[in-house]
Image: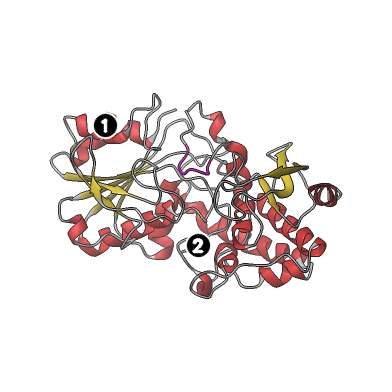
């Protein structure tokens, strides 16, 4: 298969020759033999690269989640690097002064919480505001382009982990999302999507033959990305989601829990495609740093049966029932529940505590039917 990056450098660049190009990328912007797109653009005789733009985690991936990324100078090319995760998430007019075209080359992970797709939305808005062209170099959705999971984000809880009304698992590539953003959500910039060749909707990342480069420090492997549309919800609770371990978003635990008891309760539910194993872990940072957490590891038995969102909600429901006096949803610094921002609704907290997830899932199914119809015109691959 060929990535959008390959197609751009082979032939599509000719449409932009002589124009000043800004590249939005990070360590995931590589070709099939792991050469960075920064190097490929900088050394290409037909590409006039003038600036770089860094999303969350930085241009080289050396910033933790939520950590401010500073604007700097790239030591390898001496080009300016403008931060899109610092004082502003939307580039200012001054940040765009030295470019005519912004090229987006980032690997998404297929879940709506991941900030790269909202960086893309803000870039599209800025290009619309300031008369710049926007080009998306398409890359695979690592958890396939078929399955949809979850609910749509409600307007009163939109944030940078859920900016637009898309489901937890959206089943779209970044190129397809950019078309959805433009024609459904009003990000009406001058948009070009450079499609991949050889990618099919059923493919997970390990079907592509490409090397996996982690888009962030806790994005470890295909199992983690498959579970993430559900297990990311743990971030909004007093449970450790495994940050600071070798299995983030695959393990969940807390000092007050009994992993054996939790594993039995979970496995009795016969959750499709998933088995739980009792485990203990000690996070090296974040929640319960240096404390022993008891809990479970989720193991994928059949990824084609997995609904990670339902799995995550069900697991939270079980924990709430087993530990009603210890389990809680944590508040964000601005007074809002971070869980609501992740869940895309204020309703799910109560449904979890009161064991009403089945009714919530029925509502999700109706929302997913509508989203599936809305996204259909923007799907580029079969």
Q: Residue 34: say if magenta.
A: no
Q: Indicate the position of residue 200 as horizontal and vertical percent values.
A: 52, 35
Q: Is residue 359 above or below residue 281?
A: below
Q: Indicate the position of residue 264 as horizontal and vertical percent values.
A: 85, 48
Does residue 302 appear left or right of residue 137 in this picture?
right
In this orientation, which residue lies closer to the viewer: 235 or 179? 235
In this orientation, which residue lies closer to the viewer: 207 or 346? 346
Q: Which range of residues does the magenta coloring cover?
A: 214-219
Q: Indicate the position of residue 146 as horizontal and vertical percent values.
A: 59, 44
Q: Label 1 belongs to which residue?
A: 39
Identify the disc placed on residue 225. Answer: none
Does residue 242 appear left or right of residue 332 in this picture?
right
Does residue 258 appear left or right of residue 26 in this picture?
right
For image coordinates 74% across by 42% down, the residue present is 279
For image coordinates 27% across by 59% down, the residue present is 91
In this orientation, which residue lies closer to the viewer: 178 or 54? 54
Q: Residue 218: say if magenta.
A: yes
Q: Label 2 belongs to which residue?
A: 162
In this orientation, which residue lies closer to the viewer: 296 or 130? 296
């Amino acid at each position: 298969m060929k990535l959008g990056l390959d197609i751009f450098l082979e032939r599509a660049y000719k449409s932009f020759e002589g124009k000043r190009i800004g590249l939005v990328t990070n360590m995931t912007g590589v070709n099939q033999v792991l050469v960075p797109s920064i190097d490929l653009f900088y050394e290409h005789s037909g590409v006039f690269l003038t600036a770089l733009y860094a999303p969350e985690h930085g241009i080289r991936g050396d910033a933790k989640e939520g950590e401010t990324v500073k604007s700097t100078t790239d030591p390898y090319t001496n080009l300016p690097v403008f931060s899109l995760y610092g004082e502003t998430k939307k580039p200012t007019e001054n940040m765009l002064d030295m470019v005519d075209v912004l090229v987006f080359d980032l690997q998404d992970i297929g879940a709506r919480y991941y900030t790269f797709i909202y960086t893309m939305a803000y870039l599209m808005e800025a290009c619309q505001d300031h008369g710049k062209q926007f080009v998306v170099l398409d890359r695979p959705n690592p958890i396939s382009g078929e399955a949809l999971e979850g609910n749509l984000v409600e307007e009163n809880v939109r944030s940078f982990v859920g900016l637009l009304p898309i489901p937890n698992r959206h089943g779209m590539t970044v190129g397809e999302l950019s078309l959805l953003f433009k024609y459904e959500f009003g990000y009406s910039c001058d948009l070009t999507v450079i499609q991949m060749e050889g990618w099919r909707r059923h493919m997970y990342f390990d079907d592509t033959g490409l090397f996996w480069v982690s888009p962030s420090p806790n994005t470890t492997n295909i199992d983690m990305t498959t579970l993430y549309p559900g297990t990311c919800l743990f971030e909004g609770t007093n449970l450790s989601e495994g940050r600071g371990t070798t299995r983030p978003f695959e393990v969940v635990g807390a000092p007050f829990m009994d992993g054996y008891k939790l594993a039995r309760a979970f496995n009795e539910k016969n959750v499709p495609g998933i088995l739980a194993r009792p485990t203990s872990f000690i996070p090296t940072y974040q929640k319960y740093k240096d404390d022993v957490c008891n809990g479970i590891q989720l193991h994928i038995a059949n990824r084609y049966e997995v609904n990670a969102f339902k799995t995550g909600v069900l697991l939270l429901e079980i924990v709430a029932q087993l530990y009603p006096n210890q389990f809680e949803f944590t508040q964000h610094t601005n007074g809002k529940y971070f869980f609501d921002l992740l869940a895309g609704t204020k309703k799910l907290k109560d449904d979890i505590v009161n064991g009403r997830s089945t009714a919530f899932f029925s509502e999700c199914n109706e929302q997913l039917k509508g989203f599936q119809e809305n996204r259909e015109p923007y799907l580029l691959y079969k």
